[in-house]
Amino acid sequence: EMTSGRKQPAAADRVLVFLAIGARVADAVAISSRSVLLPSEKVAMTYSVCSPPEPPPQGCPPLVFVHGTLHGSWCFERHWLPYFAERGFETYAVNLRGTEGFPLEEPRKVKVEEHVADISNFVRSVVDQPPVLLGHSFGGAYVQKVLEAGQLPLAGAVIACSVPPSGNSAMVLRFLLRS
């Protein structure tokens, strides 16, 4: 699309621009909490959703936010979900199993592959078109693993302050040895 001789960025390109600018608190949209029974292991995943005030314009893919360690969907609810919903994006934030937003009845270590499967199953079960996955911290590593598997059609992916797909134990060890 051309305006004043300049090419306008596509919707997915605008996502990156908004992330670079930062989020502001929005008041015009409501956030709701929901759950979905995932087919993988018949577990109920909870998530937050924030819809735009009007139907999304063509070219605005849904956004799925994936949190990092010791977080939940709540970390995206105040700023990020409303900010993007007000700009026409359907927004979701998942609660990964074994984390603050999705505690297990019996505590155990959850494997990376389980989180990757949960994210993929969530998208297949809830989101009606290929989304942009946005992962922060360890959520970024999960997004990279989803991309690596190549089983899920996506409109794009954004990783912020991501742990590398190989994990972060070597990095943490180097940091501790320097202290």
Image: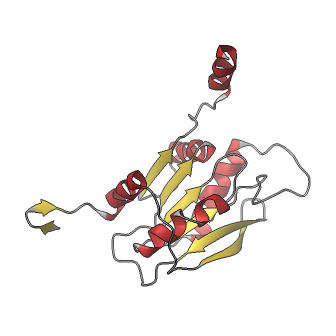
Compared across the picture, whether 87 is left or right of 36 comes to: left
174 shown above or below 165 = above
Q: Quadrant of the C terminus?
A: top right
Horizontal and vertical percent for residue 47?
Answer: 67, 67
Q: How was this image coloured?
A: secondary structure
Residue found at the far right of this picture: 106
Compared across the picture, whether 151 is left or right of 12 comes to: right
Compared across the picture, whether 171 is left or right of 85 comes to: right
Which residue is painted at 57% across and 64% down in the image? 123
Specify whether residue 76 is in view. yes
Which residue is painted at 7% across and 63% down in the image? 5
Residue found at the far left of this picture: 5
Nearest the eye: 55 or 21: 21
Residue found at the far bottom of this picture: 54
Res 170 quadrant in image: top right
118 shown above or below 68 = below
Residue found at the far top of this picture: 177
Which residue is painted at 13% across and 66% down in the image? 2
Horizontal and vertical percent for residue 119?
Answer: 62, 57
Which residue is painted at 62% across and 43% down in the image? 138
139 shown above or below 49 = above
Horizontal and vertical percent for residue 142?
Answer: 60, 46
Q: Quadrant of the N terminus?
A: bottom left
Specify whether residue 73 is in view. no
Horizontal and vertical percent for residue 105?
Answer: 90, 58
